[in-house]
Amino acid sequence: MDVERLVEQVVTGLGFELVDFETSPKGRLMRVFIDIERGVNVDDCATVSNQLTRVFEVENVDYDRLEISSPGLDRPLKKAADFERFVGSDVQVRLRMPIGNQRNFAGVLTGFAEGVVHLSTEKGEVALPFDEVEKARLVPRF
């Protein structure tokens, strides 16, 4: 049984978006990051936690601790849809392999099309292959 797929079914069934799912090396700790357009509150986390606890009991998923939270202001960008949704936002992107001796990029996300992330950086426009993105996250503006 794929626990991540099970978690995604439950989370989306409750009307939330599964932003990220992390487990400890032995699967004893599970972290679930959820989001919804209006923003996540404590009651939302409790609702998802209670539902997942029941589902895990029925499905015999063995774990020690379950943590549910919002992704925070520095939300990770994981899926292509995330890059499309947050066009115009400040982001940091780290690539698996360097492009022109550079792996880390920061700038404004100007677009996402055909598997390419477009950024406007201090040095100009850059196009980064989505498949090469190791990690990306929003940079909050204050």
Image: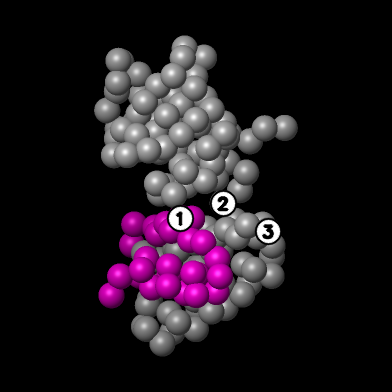
Amino acid found under the numbered disc labelled 3 = Arg
Amino acid found under the numbered disc labelled 1 = Asp
In depth, the one of 91 and 97 nearer the eye is 91
Q: Quick one: label 3 or label 1, which is nearer the N terminus?
A: 1
The C terminus sits in image quarter:
top right
Residue segment shown in magenta: 1-26
Residue found at the far top of this picture: 123
| Residue 41 visible (yes or no) | yes
Q: Mark 1–mark 2 contact, CB under 8 Å?
A: yes
Q: CA distance from mark 1 to mark 2?
A: 8 Å
41 on left or right of 15: right
- 3 vs 2, front mark: 3
The N terminus sits in image quarter:
bottom left
Q: Which residue is mark 2?
A: 71
Q: CA distance from mark 3 to mark 1?
A: 18 Å
Element assignment for label 3: loop
